[in-house]
Amino acid sequence: MPAETTTVTTELAVLGAGPGGYTAAFRAADLGRKVVLIDAAAQLGGVCLNVGCIPSKTLLHTAKAILDAQALDGVHFGAPTIDLAAMRAGKDRVVSRLTRGLAQLARQRGITVLRGEGRFVGPRRLRVAAPDGTVEVAFADAIIACGSEPVRIPGLPADPRIMDSTGALELPDIPRRLLVVGGGIIGLEMAAVYHALGTRITVVERLGQLLPGADPDLVQPLAKCLAARYERVHLRTEMQFVSAGTDGIRVRLAGPEGAPEELFDRVLVAVGRRPNGAKIDAAAAGVKVDARGFIAVDAQMRTNVPHIFAVGDVVGEPMLAHKATHEAKIAAEVICGHAVRFDARTIPSVAYTDPEIAWMGLTETEAKARNIAYEKATIPWQASGRAQASGVPEGLTKLLLDPKSRRILGAGIVGSSAGDLIAEAVLALEMDAEAGDIALAIHPHPTFAETLAMAAEWAEGSITDLIRPREVR
């Protein structure tokens, strides 16, 4: 682009090229729209692909291989040799392969990609501050997919040893001791990586349990494993004082165990994410942004300005890539004249810890808080031949049912591949399946997926792998 301001006219402008943004752009282009996709990063894919979901899962795969090798019966390996440069290169290759694929898909669809910070300057105009000049984009419709960023704790020293998730994924070194502030999904996933590499881990969570969104019975097997692996896991605890010195990061913790002061080589702050709604000058287009940075939308992903839509993290919790892509297709299809709306009955959540935890639909915690009647069927993985053979009998599978209709209300799984297994329960809920529908579907043996059928059989009173202490249906 030349240095002076130029103008591009398009039918649809998409602000943000993460999972929500590129999905919206691709779907709209497939439906015949002329699309401009705007993002400040050098590569498409947003946080998820570049510094989030994909690189973290690449490192977690390596971490799991290390831990699995240590747990094999009758097979002994030497201590692993860790080559951080090679690990970083491998992670970067995965990311590069996928981002190149997105760039090719954009080219094949004839989408114009603009690199630079995009901000609204009017109800039908965006200004993009590109590295080599300013571009103004005139549009008929727009989709905001500007995502979120890590929450920063005010008052912390400006020290590179105090990291957010993006910094932790760079694997700057293998610290002897790492403090992870935040016992949610991001913090525990990164803790798993560094633990496998040999770091001694301490986790601090200000609430009363790890993974606060999950039911306690799902978290308990993970908490038990982490208590054995990590130096400490502090619940109902916060950082009271932090100082950076030549010998490390000194932290005073305030919680039920008093106010101990400890020295760490690095600190990872993973206390959540905040939406970027306040960073795009949405008011210039008349789009309302609340005090937290969220943009309200209706069931068709439309903001208060009829021709401007929003998807992904910026429209509210849960901040998950698979939610963003679903919303993105709806927004693109509405713009292209389709009569569709957001009508997902559940959005599954997964913590890719070891063991994994996944849940969807109604949780027990929610059911009790809202006084919703439910029936529970829980199968401990000690009853699963596949779990026993794989050395992971600590898991469990749980179904929640409507006591009258027998329909699936919710499900939770803790154990190997829980994130993959939960998809069957999501489909069951969306299809209004009853427990009997799952119980009568023949599941392959021996598999982890059998535990869902076993839970349904327990609910139906037809299980033979365990004794059911009630009248057989």
Image (cartoon, helix red, strand yellow):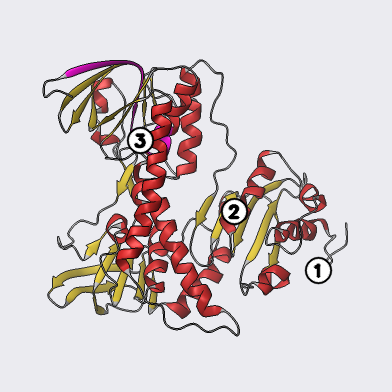
User: How many C-alpha atoms fall within 10 Å of the one at disc 1: few (<14), some, or many (≥20)?
Assistant: few
Locate residue 377, reporting x and y percent: 72, 60
Judged from the image, the secondary structure of the residue bearing numbered disc 3 is loop
15 over 447 or under it: above or below: above
| Quadrant hosting residue 144 | top left
Image point (52%, 58%), residue name: 214
Contact, mark 2 vs mark 3 (Cβ under 8 Å):
no
226 over 332 or under it: above or below: below
Residue topped by disc 1: 465
Locate residue 425, reporting x and y percent: 66, 49
Judged from the image, the secondary structure of the residue bearing numbered disc 1 is loop
Comparing 258 with 80, the one in front is 80
Image point (30%, 46%), residue name: 149
Q: Tell me if 106 is positioned left or right of 127 in this view.
A: right
Locate residue 205, reporting x and y percent: 37, 66
Residue topped by disc 2: 420
Contact, mark 1 vs mark 3 (Cβ under 8 Å):
no
User: How many C-alpha atoms fall within 10 Å of the one at disc 3: few (<14), some, or many (≥20)?
Assistant: many
What type is the residue that disc 1 sits on? Asp
Q: Is residue 280 visible?
A: yes
Residue topped by disc 3: 17
**Magenta part of the protein: which range?**
6-22
What type is the residue that disc 3 sits on? Ala
Q: Closer to us: mark 2 or mark 1?
A: 2
301 over 178 or under it: above or below: above
Comparing 200 with 218, the one in front is 200
Residue that protrudes farthest toward the right in the picture: 472
